[in-house]
Image (tube, rainbow, N blue to C red):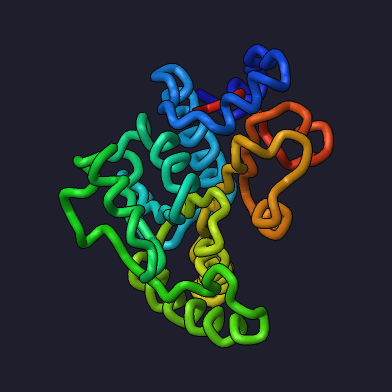
Amino acid sequence: MRLNDLAAFQPEKSGSCDNREKICHSSKPETERDGLLFERWLVARVWSKRKRRSWAGTAQLPLRTAVVLGSGGHTMEMLSLLKEVDQERYRCDFIMAQTDSSSLKKVQATRPDLAKDLTRFHVIPRSREVGQSWSSSLLTTAQAFLACLGLVWELNPQVLLVNGPGTCFPVVAAVLLFELIAFRRVSLIFVESVCRVKSLSMSGKLIYPFADAFLVHWPELVERYAKAQYLGILF
């Protein structure tokens, strides 16, 4: 399916604000139809970029895909997105913070097939802890960025999929530098939180200028942000 075909897709708009609040606080996984829709969109988006900008090295499947996990709801949303993603097309490696004690357990509970190979899980220093002062976070962020540089070089990803946890910032920065110095293209795909209805999250605002694809769950955001793409609610 071509990207234009998916762009023309217009899912039904949701009803009341009450429904939106229920969705934001729901822990139910996405439906099979929505999961397949995201997988088809991902295929169309990544391969559309491949036609415009060639990757260094082989373009054979599966594509090397780096996925950033964050503690809390970010990980559950990401796992919902990955539910129907074909691992034969996108071989996922997962990146999480050293102090994140919950993400691996959530993957093991919801997608045990992805957790069989623990070599696909990589930890980096957390750039900023909750409550940490901004001045001291400069050093920890620099440490996280340096760790990400080595990891990105090792993984050599073709796709980077993020949905906004703080852990993603040094990873995104490392990937952008990787593209610049190694001349290897990476498709940066950002999926905004389902709870963001009328405005972007701080993560979304910072990554928006650099994202190759920016996916939102509500049509109001498409009206405000030209790059945003709306496929309906995927959770």
Residue 5 appears in the figure: yes
Report whether 201 appears left or right of 96: right
Who is closer to the viewer here, 132 or 234? 132
- What count of labels does the image hold? 0
| Residue 205 at x, y percent in the picture | 73, 54
The residue depicted at 70 percent of the width and 56 percent of the height is 202
- When the figure is inspected, residue 222 is found, relative to residue 187, above or below; the finding is above
Q: Is residue 31 left or right of residue 212?
A: left
Q: Residue furthest right?
A: 224
- The x and y percentages for residue 206 are 70, 60
Residue 228 versus residue 170 in the image, above or below: above
Residue 183 in view in this figure? no
Please give the name of the residue rendered at 29% of the width and 54% of the height, measured from the top-left corner.
Answer: 104
Residue 165 locus on image (x, y percent) = 54, 56
Q: Residue at x 42, y 34 (%)?
A: 80
Residue 210 lies, with reference to residue 79, above or below; the image says: below
71 lies above or below 124:
above
Where residue 61 appears, as percent x and y from the top left, is 31, 44
Task: Please give left or right for residue 196 compared with residue 46 in the image.
Answer: right
* Snapshot quadrant of residue 89: top left
Could you say which quadrant of the image residue 170 lies in? bottom right
Q: Nearer the viewer, residue 103 or 6?
A: 103
Which one is nearer the viewer's eye here, 20 or 58? Answer: 20
Q: Residue furthest left?
A: 116
Residue 117 quadrant:
bottom left
**Residue located at (48% from left, 50% from top):** 161
